[in-house]
Amino acid sequence: MTFRRYTGQPPRHALPAGSIDTQLHLYLPDYPADPNGPAIPAGCPGPAEYRQVMGWLGISRCVVTQGNAHQFDNENLIASLAAMGDIARGVAVITGETPSSELERLHAAGIRGARIMDLPGGATGLSHLEELDARAAEMGWVLAVQFDGSRICEEEARLAKLQSNWILDHHGKIFSGAAPDGPEVAAIKRLLDKGRCHFKLAGIYESAKHPAPAFEDVSAYTRVFTAHAPERIVWGTNFPHNQATSAENYPDDAALLDLAFSWLPKDEVRQLAFVENPERLFFRH
């Protein structure tokens, strides 16, 4: 029996109608892990399990991201989107050499984004940033960018030149920590002000040094961004919390959602972050 929990006590806050989870992975049993990637999470959590989470939290739509386990093979992602139906869109892994015909096939399957994951296990790193940005811009896709945000100042100039709409994943993953008035936060605010950068509220526990449920170190600078640019904030569950290894360290999805509500104190900014911003990025084309 898997240690993952797909239902539980409801969150204190109700998501707005039409809310979109922009960060999750799904795994189907017929698609084994690539030898160059990490293992598939225990229990192979897929569409059936995730639909339970949708009902628990009140999620209406979702954006499925290609997991590191499958590296450059997007077939599990395509099958997962087919299983979820029209409520789902996807973020795939591509390269600068991916044929345009393949991009069109991915688009027809519901893919609306490309992923850069410049951390251990990731398939495509920051060295491919510009070429993937060009492909994403060609398709009208979003670029999802994840790396050690401790380097955000040195990468700022490259990121500021991106042509596509892009998302800084997982609270920026500033592993070294950042003060709300520090240089890393200032750099992200400048990127947000360019108009193409978006900031994702998901997986806070992966970079926070302070404990649950508040994760106050990352929460402190997250509140800066949600106040500064609510029109460029998106949210995700990070289902199925791939890094969790036991019931003891498995995150509480309802508590994480309530924490996200605490960063978005007004109904109008919640409507933006949970519904309108992700809808504009993933569901309008």
Image: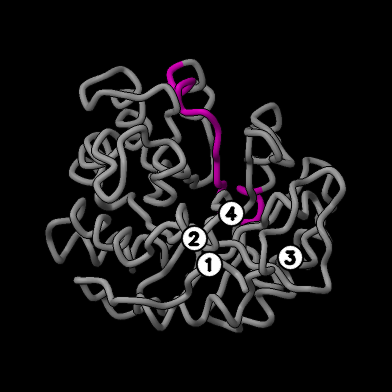
Which residue appears at 70% of the width and 73% of the height?
109
Q: Is residue 180 left or right of residue 32?
A: left
Q: CA distance from mark 2 to mark 4?
A: 13 Å
Image quadrant where residue 113 sits? bottom right
Q: Which numbered dot is residue 243? A: none
For marks 1 and 2, the one nearer the N-term is 1
At which x and y percent is residue 87? 52, 80
User: In the figure, 259 relative to 131: above or below?
Assistant: below
Residue designated by label 4: 242
For marks 2 and 4, the one nearer the N-term is 4
Residue designated by label 3: 106
Which residue appears at 32% of the width and 65% of the height?
274
At which x and y percent is residue 240? 55, 62
Q: CA distance from mark 3 to mark 1?
A: 30 Å
Q: Nearer the viewer, mark 1 or mark 2?
A: 2
157 or 225: which is nearer to us? 225
For marks 3 and 2, the one nearer the N-term is 3
Residue designated by label 1: 4
Magenta range: 136-153
Q: Is residue 150 left or right of residue 36?
A: left
Q: CA distance from mark 1 to mark 2?
A: 7 Å
**Three-letter amino acid code at the position of disc 1:** Arg
Residue designated by label 2: 247
